[in-house]
């Protein structure tokens, strides 16, 4: 992957013939799926990876975001929302790109998200630490766990977004996640006005130079990107036990 491109040990997925698919999934609206996708895609592109963003959401926010940008984004955005072959199309991108990010819809669609999860190597579940989000947070975990019945090696992790660690809700969310045993990013994306500012301007933490509040946002998104690489490589701290168990199940199924 990404031969002869800029080298950074931190955000370069292991070199492989085929690229990887990272789907960003949560049926709850407004949790930060599109924000996560556009910013992480920009970081991977800045590190010399060939990146494509698949917009699988009928609202087409990522597509519109790309249209806002003064300069062309450093990666292509394609809208496949209405494409019944979305899974097959995503798989085709794996031969041309190092990483395919998929921005999933923020509603309870029964077709698109399962089709995307079926071809994903990694599912990132952004979750917002608020009361209503807490009630809704089991749904995306159930969707991934269902897929893991037939594909236990499917990797996933929850990324806390809009985080405000001083609030009671934040503590409640952390407790729920600890009890759910879901793998968690160590990095939390804080609630920062800068994300709204750069989002509507078609920019990312990488192109937000001179915007107040951008440096800490860039640092936390870069830390999340490093964790994505660890998750894809199976070296993320949250995977130490679950990976071994998944491999045993798959080996057993293959006998
Ligand atoms: N960490 C953050 N801090 C502050 N605002 C944020 C943060 N993340 C996202 N936002 C803002 O919250 C709103 C929703 O974010 P975003 O569009 O990324 O969510 P989404 O999950 O993709 O929503 P949808 O389900 O509607 O597609 C946007 O206005 C965005 O700029
Ligand atoms: Mg969105």
Image (cartoon, rainbow, N blue to C red):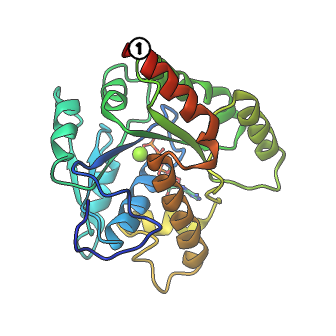
Q: Position of residue 244 (x, y in %)?
A: 56, 32
Examine the rendering and report whether any part of residue 14 can be seen.
Answer: yes
Q: Is residue 96 left or right of residue 135?
A: left
Q: Residue at x 81, y 44 (%)?
A: 171
Q: Residue at x 17, y 26 (%)?
A: 84
Q: Position of residue 112 (x, y in %)?
A: 31, 27
Q: Is residue 89 left or right of residue 14?
A: left
Above or below for 123 versus 50: above
For label 1, being within 8 Å of ligand 1 is answered no
Above or below for 193 versus 82: below
Q: Secondary structure at mark 1?
A: helix
Above or below for 239 versus 198: above
Q: Position of residue 47 (x, y in %)?
A: 36, 72
Quadrant of the rendered image containing residue 139: top right
Pointer 1 residue: 253
Examine the rendering and report whether any part of residue 82 can be seen.
Answer: no
Front residue of 182/140: it is: 182
For the N terminus, the quadrant is bottom left
Quadrant of the rendered image containing residue 6: bottom left
Q: Position of residue 150 (x, y in %)?
A: 41, 17
Q: Residue at x 53, y 72 (%)?
A: 218
Q: Ligand 2: which quarter?
A: top left
**How packed is label 1: few (under 14 Cα within 10 Å), some, or many (20 or more)?**
few
Q: Residue at x 35, y 66 (%)?
A: 202
Of all residues, the one furthest to the front in this rendering is 255
Query: Disc count in the image?
Result: 1
For the C terminus, the quadrant is top left
Front residue of 245/64: it is: 245
């Amino acid at each position: 992957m990404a031969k002869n491109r800029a080298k950074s040990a931190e955000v370069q997925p292991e070199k492989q013939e085929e690229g990887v698919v990272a789907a960003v999934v949560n049926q709850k609206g407004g949790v930060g799926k599109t924000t996560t996708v556009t910013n992480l895609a920009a970081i991977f592109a800045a590190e010399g990876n060939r990146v494509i963003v698949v917009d699988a959401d009928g609202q087409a926010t990522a597509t519109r975001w790309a249209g806002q940008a003064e300069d062309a984004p450093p990666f292509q955005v394609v809208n496949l929302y209405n494409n019944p072959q979305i899974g097959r199309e995503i798989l085709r991108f794996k031969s041309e790109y190092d990483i395919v990010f998929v921005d999933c819809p923020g509603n309870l669609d029964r077709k698109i998200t399962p089709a995307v999860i079926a071809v994903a190597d990694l599912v990132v579940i952004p979750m917002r630490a608020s009361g209503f989000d807490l009630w809704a947070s089991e749904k995306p975990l159930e969707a991934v766990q269902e897929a893991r019945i037939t594909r236990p090696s499917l990797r996933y992790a929850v990324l806390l977004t809009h985080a405000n660690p001083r609030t009671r809700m934040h503590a409640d969310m952390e407790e729920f996640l600890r009890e759910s045993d879901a793998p968690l990013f160590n990095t939390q994306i804080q609630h920062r006005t800068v994300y709204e500012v750069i989002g509507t301007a078609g920019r990312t933490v990488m192109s937000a130079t001179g915007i107040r509040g951008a440096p800490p946002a860039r640092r936390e998104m870069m830390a999340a990107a490093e964790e994505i690489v660890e998750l894809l490589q199976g070296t993320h701290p949250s995977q130490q036990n679950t990976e071994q168990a998944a491999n045993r199940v798959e080996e057993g199924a293959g006998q």
